[in-house]
Each structure stands twice: as structure tokens, then as C-alpha cells.
Amino acid sequence: MKEKENSSPLSFKELPVGFEFSPTSYELSEPTVAKYLEAVDESADFLALGMIPPLAIAACAMTALAQSFTVPPGSIHASQEFEFLKLVPIGSRVSCGGKIGQKLARGNLNLIVLQINVLDESGEPVLSGKATIAAPN
């Protein structure tokens, strides 16, 4: 899926608010979509529709961004809020980008909010949203 290799991922704590991740381009091929469907226990019949499940796009976007930084053991994906703006055909190439929208410290937890955007091959928005990761101190 991922074509661009990040040299050395930054640690979770090194990322300042406003840090922008380098865009990552990837193809959502039929085998990739089939693996996603298997992982979420959804019927492969979905492939006949010819469209990528919107949450598969979100999962790939999160994976692409998460490869840019490291989090300590015990970290969790605490929440997400996505707006899916258009359907994307299987086999399409999309570009994922994002930035650090917010960082908070709450007791023994550090929270980081990722703002995520995905564009299709023509540069039109496909997905917009945010995800929060919680990590222990």
C-alpha cells in the first residue's frame, strides 16, 4: 500500500501542534480491499459493488500517517470523527495527508489529535476528519 518510506519516525512527544505530515500516495487495489473486508468480517460480495468501503480508506489513511511517528507501548486509538465526501472506485490512487491539530496532557495521558485529509487522483477531497491517540506518560 505505502510507496513512500519515512526515514526515521519522530516520537509521539516530538510532534508539535501544526506539524504537517508529508503526503503519502497509495493505490487501494482489490487485494487490499479484500484484506480489509476479511479483517472486519464483511462479505467479499462487497467487491462486486466496485467501490472501496469508506472505512477502508480511513484505515489506510491512519496507517499511512501512523508510520510517520512512534507511540509508547500502551497507546490507544481513542476516538475518530470522519466525513466521507465521495465514493472511490476500487483500484483508485489516493493521497493522504494530515497534521497535528492538538496536543493535550490529562493526568497520566498524553493526547494527540490528528487532522486527516484524503484526496483522489484528481485532487478532490474524499475524506476529512480527525483521530485522537492517547498515550501513557
Image: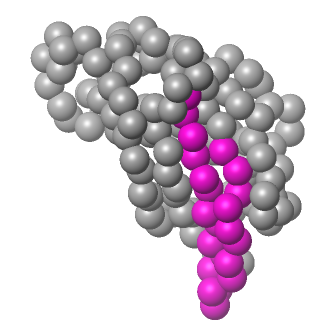
Residue 67's image quarter? Answer: top right
**What x and y, as percent, mark residue 40?**
26, 37
Front in this rendered view, residue 130 or 28: 130
The answer to whether residue 95 is left or right of residue 37 is: right
In the rendered image, is residue 41 in sight?
yes
Quadrant where the N terminus lies? Answer: top right
Q: Is residue 125 above or below residue 45?
A: below
Q: Is residue 82 above or below residue 95?
A: below
Q: Is residue 101 magenta?
A: yes
Q: How is the image coloured?
A: one colour
In the rendered image, is residue 33 in sight?
no
Q: Is residue 93 above or below residue 119?
A: above
The boundaries of the magenta stretch are 98-119
The answer to whether residue 97 is left or right of residue 22 is: left
Quadrant where the C terminus lies? Answer: bottom right
Front in this rendered view, residue 98 or 9: 98
- Seen at 78% across and 58% down, the residue is 18
Front in this rendered view, residue 91 or 6: 91
**What x and y, as percent, mark residue 68?**
73, 42
Q: Is residue 117 magenta?
A: yes
**What x and y, as percent, mark residue 132?**
54, 63
- Seen at 46% across and 12% down, the residue is 92
- Seen at 70% across and 50% down, the residue is 99
- Seen at 63% across and 86% down, the residue is 106
Residue 41's image quarter? Answer: top left
| Mark count | 0
**What x and y, as percent, mark residue 135?**
62, 69
Query: Most prominent secondary structure in the magenta stretch?
Result: strand
